[in-house]
Image (tube, rainbow, N blue to C red):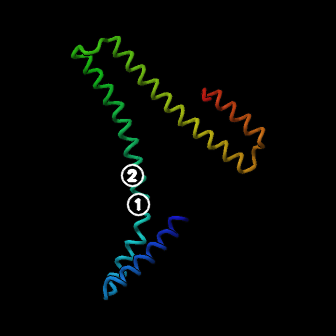
Amino acid sequence: MILIVLSLIMGFIGLNIGGIIGGAEIYAYLFGVVGVLSPGLFILEQIYKRSKFNEEDKLFAKTDELDLIKLRDIEVLSNAQLEDVIEMNKKKANKSESDEKFQKYKKLLDELKQSGYFSDNQYFSSLDKLEKYYDVY
């Protein structure tokens, strides 16, 4: 809804700027179209950047492991060191995934409380259980 209102406002501003700049109506229409489309394009770009960032994180994790194996192959790391580093990276990835799940479930509990499904006591009891399960304090 906000994006629609913002598009309309930007389109109006674009029409006015286009009308001021040139005597031909084409400028008003062009600036108006740019104004209407710009908020949506901005949001799409932000979504695209976030998705690319997540894909790059996964790619780096795979690349890092291959690089570590290469370091072992050229005898910079021993087998034991390689196993330790890979295990450390796996624990870090699991912790990150666990944190994401905790935040997702906490948001769900918040929504249930806001909708009136949970009382304050039920909400805090459920939140305590969730924190204990994910070892978050």
Q: Which residue is mark 2?
A: 48
Label 1 residue SS: helix
Residue 132 spot, x, y in % from top left: 65, 27
| Residue 85 figure quarter | top left
**In the rendered image of this protein, does residue 86 appear above or below residue 20?**
above
| Residue 59 figure quarter | top left
Which residue is at the front of the view, 65 or 14? 14
Looking at the image, which residue sits at the far left? 74
Residue 43 spot, x, y in % from top left: 44, 58
Disc on res. 123: none
> Callout 2, which amino acid?
Tyr
Q: Which residue is mark 1?
A: 42
Residue 34 spot, x, y in % from top left: 37, 72
Residue at 47% x, 70% y: name it: 7
- First along the sequence among labels 1 and 2: 1
> Callout 1, which amino acid?
Phe
**In the rendered image of this protein, does residue 67 appear above or below residue 47?**
above
* Horizontal relation, residue 18 to residue 108: left or right: left
**In the rendered image of this protein, does residue 53 appear above or below residue 76?**
below
Observer-side mark, 1 or 2, equals 1
**In the rendered image of this protein, does residue 101 appear above or below residue 38?**
above
Residue 79 spot, x, y in % from top left: 32, 12
Q: CA distance from mark 1 to mark 2?
A: 10 Å
* Horizontal relation, residue 9 to residue 124: left or right: left
Label 2 residue SS: helix
